Image (cartoon, grey):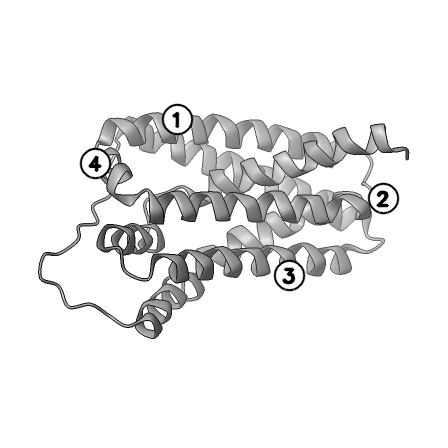
Amino acid sequence: MNLPDFLPSASAVMLQGLVLSLGLIIAIGAQNAFVLRQGLRREHVGSVVLWCAVADALLIAAGVMGMAAALGDRPGLARALAFAGAAFLAFYGWQALRRARRPQAMQATAESGAKRIGRGAALAQAAAFTLLNPHVYLDTVLLMGSIGAQQPAAMRGWFIAGASSGSVLWFTALGYGARWMAPWFARPAAWRVLDGLIGVTMLVLAGMMVRLGLGSPLP
């Protein structure tokens, strides 16, 4: 593979990882609310953002590499995982579109007079919101891992980089843009638009996974 052929493929795979990561991570949840609250309080924002982003990156990498090792020369398993991933993405997209019909709002206020917590306590809470949530393993290790593992071996690093970049961008925007983003997150109409975009994106990705499952397994 020459360089001109490699770059478009690498960028496409990285973009796929980025879009998938953002689609899965942007949702009303305890972890996002905690990062937003820390941003509003301007309290250990950098440490919390770094922890969340690094934890996601490690889980995604572990999922991709572990799934790649598990798949090995098992085309039947790779095809089954592609269809399972497509089903999950389609279900996730349907849920997002359903949420768009009945939008909610995420509230995370900076309590006036609230006692400041230490960096260790903030990181412990961030770790709990991240690692004690079973959904995070379904998203990062199983789903993104199975999709990333089916990329060609030379492209898996680009997929991990793209997916990890999604976490970095989101948590950085959430933590450091909290004071600007908080009013936006409090408006159900904003979540209606966001969930609508996520729903359509997930359905498109589900179609791509079906196409992958129907085609030949990637080397």
Gap in angstroms between the C-alphas marked 1 and 2:
34 Å
Task: Residue 103 in the image: state x and y as whole percent.
Answer: 26, 32
Amino acid type of the residue tagged 4 in the rendering = Pro
Element type where label 4 sits in the image = helix
- Earlier in the chain: of badge 3 and badge 4, it is 3
| Residue 120 occupies quadrant | bottom left
Q: Quadrant of the C terminus?
A: top right
User: What whole-number distance in Å separates the C-alpha atoms at marks 1 and 4?
Assistant: 19 Å
Name which of mark 1 and mark 4 comes first in the sequence.
Answer: 4
- What amino acid is at disc 1? Gly
Q: Which dot, 1 or 4, sits closer to the camera?
A: 4
Q: Which residue was labeled with disc 1?
A: 196
Q: Report whether 215 appears left or right of 200.
A: right
**Viewer-nearest of labels 3 and 4?**
4
Which one is in front in this view, the residue at disc 1 or the one at disc 3?
3
Within 10 angstroms of label 1, few (less than 14), some, or many (20 or more) residues?
many
Q: Considering the numbered disc 1 on the image, is that residue within a helix, a strand or a loop?
A: helix
Q: Position of residue 43 (x, y in %)?
A: 27, 60
Residue 178 place in picture, x, y as percent: 29, 44
Q: Amino acid at mark 3?
A: Ala
Percent x, y for residue 80?
70, 45
Occupied quadrant, residue 159: top right
Residue 123 found in image quarter: bottom left
Among numbered discs 2 and 3, the one appearing first in the sequence: 3
Q: Which residue is mark 2?
A: 219
**Cα distance, mark 2 to mark 3?**
19 Å
Distance Cα–Cα, label 4 vs label 2: 47 Å
Q: Which mark is residue 183?
A: 4
Residue where numbered disc 3 is placed: 62
